[in-house]
Image (cartoon, rainbow, N blue to C red):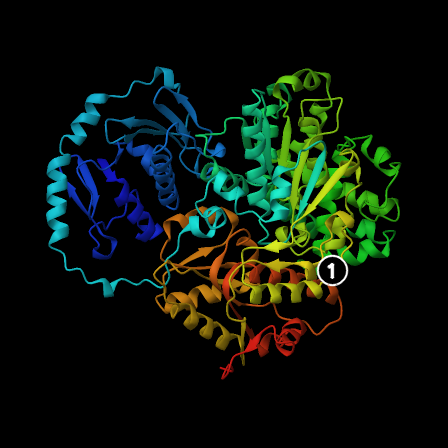
């Protein structure tokens, strides 16, 4: 069976049809609330939207091999069609350019790319784009093998045979849609939502480069205009426009080079694909020159994979995770499982002579703060110390490791038994990776760093190196990652010209898991910063994202942070911040007698959220990820249309959930903004004194992240069952920063 969608119809289906209906397309197409209808001939189904014209762009899915269709996981179909739509949208303004992780390759108007995530089976589409006056797109072949496009000949007669029935299909569907009752009250819509308005477009506001230069604050304009003789660090809290300034600066340098007839290569490096794609979308939105081929926007891990010669790559091994962000999470999970296994077995052979500090951490409960801190330290030790010194399991490993001079920045190991325990975990970890044919992002970066120090790369630098390097979210780059950046510039005779943006209050420990920030901050030798040479600093002190009332709460949370040992380059003074946004209502506090009442009240508040004429946006932000399912279930019971964000990878799906309340854990909503934020689901506060400092800091960091997602309104919900009101919230009420809602007890 062939399928023909109009672009508008596919957008509507992706927005409204549940994921489980897509096998391979929604089984139910003629839904009145979806605004689409279908018409079928013997071998083709047409899906057309209300209002489509004869010249509408058509997306043709040619008939596929049944065995290939059967092999596609059920959950993958909707995400595959999201990519299909993305291709249609990208082809609107040729040349076609897709996210780098899709591994696109071209031959004329043919393009091949990954149809879904790697975990879904390495499926690839062979697609023909820009056919006819409507710029139709035909998806000819779905395969798990890469095809030589030069030898693929699209059967044009098949395409013409399919669309020959277009006129009849359009007439029949239009008649069917015209006869439908238009009862809009039956449509369950709580909030209108658009990723462009909460992601990059909420920052760029649709303005181009020239118009933005007129709107920048003096601090921002100074940064964008300033020359880059050496390394520059751009510091600022959430909402201060760091990423916008980074993109404008990259464009400024691109335009300057063109005006001076000077060749330039610019790298924008990130730690994850999600951030890279947001940067890429933002640059496309702001650029007014028709494209920026001089700029590569790519995660560092992906750059390492593509830049290393084939003979240096681990053939037959796949990367653990898609990028550094997902890779580190997977590493932590594996190391945690190994430590747990050893603690219940081989640990007895170490226990007698191991130091007290190691013993307490190994013997602590799994997922406790102590155990998690040990796992984080082990991951850093494996990457920056063992792999960094080329120590692999074997006869000489113990001798080399035991005699290695340790620095204050390394994991605290007090005696040889402690080190032998680390080697035991390291050996089991590498053996498991080898058995599973996996390579970690840290291992890849270490191999990449070794290659960058070779004569071969030194010869390539003049051609393949970069004139300028931009780094977003520097605070999430490990030491080995930051060291490798220094070698990616063209010149070997000068310090690197590098521009780095960072948020002083977002530490890696808050992104990956519950790990003490001091451990993370100290697990670096400082070599990466020393190799930068002179470093200039720009600090952004005006926030544009949220109202003065929300800024007052953000400042209040800032002031109660414990002292962080992050060094002077990470400092920021919250009292100097100002807001340029319009005034709004003060944040409001609701208290509840127990967790059940809190969940019920939050679900009710989410369901009562009403859209305004300009697409009002609401998010329910959960502070404790473990409590997320309860809130999701309650919102669904209220028949609220929601979209659940359970990882950074889910953010792209927001494009197809325009009329939904967004529900997610705080750490996964970084970078997005909403008119209204309902904050709930705080972790239970233990009465014990152990790790109280860390628990407080963890809570404050997540609260800061959640509050700073809002532009206009903030609601705070807490239950007495979870330990009552945290001190930071009580003091916010007493100081007049937060209003205590009347009749707030439920």
In percent of the image, x 35 and y 15: which residue is there? 151
Q: Tell me if I can see residue 740 in this picture.
A: yes
Residue that carries the numbered disc 1 in the rendered image: 364
Quadrant, the N terminus: top left
Q: Position of residue 502 (x, y in %)?
A: 65, 46
For residue 257, above or below residue 738: above
Task: Locate residue 213 relative to residue 652 in the image: left or right.
Answer: right
Q: Position of residue 418 (x, y in %)?
A: 83, 47
| Quadrant assignment, res 190 | bottom left
**Dot 1 alpha-carbon crowd within 10 angstroms: few under 14, some 14 to 19, many 20 or more:** some
Q: Position of residue 605 (x, y in %)?
A: 43, 71
| Quadrant assignment, res 228 | top right
Q: State the SS at label 1.
A: loop
Q: Tell me if I can see residue 326 in this picture.
A: no
In percent of the image, x 25 and y 53: which residue is there? 34
In percent of the image, x 57 and y 41: which residue is there? 272
For residue 437, above or below residue 611: above
Towards the viewer: 440 or 635: 635
For residue 229, above or below residue 79: above
Towards the viewer: 525 or 626: 525
């Amino acid at each position: 069976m062939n399928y023909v969608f109009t672009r508008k119809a596919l957008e509507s289906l992706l927005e409204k049809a549940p994921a489980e209906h897509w096998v391979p397309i929604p089984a139910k197409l003629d839904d009145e609330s979806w605004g689409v209808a279908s018409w079928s001939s013997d071998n083709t189904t047409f899906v057309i939207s209300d209002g489509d014209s004869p010249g509408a762009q058509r997306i043709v899915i040619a008939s596929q091999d049944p065995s290939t269709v059967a092999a596609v996981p059920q959950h993958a179909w909707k995400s595959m069609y999201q990519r299909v739509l993305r291709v249609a949208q990208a082809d609107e303004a040729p040349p076609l350019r897709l996210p780098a992780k899709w591994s696109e390759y071209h031959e004329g108007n043919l393009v091949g790319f990954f149809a879904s995530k790697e975990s879904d089976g390495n499926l690839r589409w062979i697609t023909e784009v820009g056919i006819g006056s409507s710029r139709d797109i035909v998806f000819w072949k779905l395969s798990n093998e890469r095809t030589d496009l030069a030898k693929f000949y699209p059967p044009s007669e098949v395409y013409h045979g399919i669309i020959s029935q277009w006129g009849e299909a359009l007439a029949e569907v239009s008649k069917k849609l015209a006869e439908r009752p238009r009862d809009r009250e039956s449509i369950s819509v709580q909030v209108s939502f658009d990723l462009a308005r909460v992601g990059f477009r909420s920052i760029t506001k649709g303005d181009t480069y020239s118009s933005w230069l007129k709107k920048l604050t003096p601090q921002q304009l100074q940064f964008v205009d300033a020359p880059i003789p050496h390394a520059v660090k751009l510091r600022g809290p959430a909402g201060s426009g760091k990423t916008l300034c980074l993109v404008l600066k990259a464009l400024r340098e691109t335009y300057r080079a063109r005006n001076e007839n000077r060749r330039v290569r610019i790298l924008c490096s990130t730690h994850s694909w999600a951030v890279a794609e947001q940067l890429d979308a933002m640059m496309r939105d702001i650029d007014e020159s028709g494209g920026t081929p001089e700029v590569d926007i790519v995660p560092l891990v992906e750059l390492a994979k593509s830049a290393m010669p084939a003979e240096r790559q681990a053939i037959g091994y796949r990367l653990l995770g898609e990028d550094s962000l997902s890779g580190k999470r997977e590493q932590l999970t594996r190391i945690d499982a190994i430590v747990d296994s050893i603690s219940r077995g081989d640990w007895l052979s170490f226990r007698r002579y191991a130091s007290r500090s190691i013993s307490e951490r190994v013997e602590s409960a799994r997922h406790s703060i102590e155990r998690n801190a040990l796992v984080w330290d082990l991951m850093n030790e494996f990457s920056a110390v063992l792999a960094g010194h080329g120590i692999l399991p074997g006869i000489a490993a113990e001798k080399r490791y035991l005699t290695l001079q340790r620095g204050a920045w390394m994991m605290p190991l007090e005696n040889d038994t402690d080190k032998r325990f680390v080697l035991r975990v390291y050996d089991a970890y590498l053996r498991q990776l080898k058995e599973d044919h996996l390579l970690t992002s840290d291992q890849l970066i270490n191999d990449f760093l070794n290659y960058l120090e070779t004569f071969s790369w030194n010869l390539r630098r003049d051609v393949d190196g970069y004139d300028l390097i931009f780094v977003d979210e520097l605070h999430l780059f490990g030491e080995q990652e930051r060291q490798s950046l220094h070698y990616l510039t063209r010149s070997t005779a000068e310090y690197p010209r590098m521009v780095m943006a960072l948020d002083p209050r977002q530490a890696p420990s808050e992104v990956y898991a519950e790990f003490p920030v001091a451990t993370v901050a100290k697990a670096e030798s400082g070599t990466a910063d020393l190799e930068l040479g002179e470093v200039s600093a720009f600090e952004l002190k005006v926030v544009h994202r949220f109202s003065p009332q929300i800024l007052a709460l953000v400042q209040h949370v800032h002031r109660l942070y414990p002292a962080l040992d992050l060094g002077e380059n990470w400092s920021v003074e919250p009292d100097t911040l100002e807001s340029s946004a319009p005034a709004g209502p003060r944040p409001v506090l609701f208290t509840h007698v127990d967790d059940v009442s809190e969940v019920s009240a939050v679900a009710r508040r989410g369901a009562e959220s009403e859209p305004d004429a300009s697409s009002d946006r609401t998010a329910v932000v959960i502070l404790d990820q473990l409590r997320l399912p309860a809130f999701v279930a309650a919102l669904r019971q209220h028949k609220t249309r929601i979209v659940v964000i359970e990882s950074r990878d889910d953010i792209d799906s927001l494009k197809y959930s325009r009329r939904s309340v967004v529900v997610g854990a705080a750490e996964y909503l970084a970078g997005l903004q909403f008119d209204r934020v309902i904050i709930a689901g705080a972790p239970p506060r233990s009465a014990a004194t152990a790790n109280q400092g860390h628990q407080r800091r963890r809570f404050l960091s997540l609260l800061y992240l959640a509050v700073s997602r809002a532009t206009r309104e903030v609601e705070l919900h807490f239950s007495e069952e979870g330990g009552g009101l945290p001190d930071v919230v009580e003091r916010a009420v007493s100081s007049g920063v937060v209003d205590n809602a009347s009749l707030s007890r439920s």
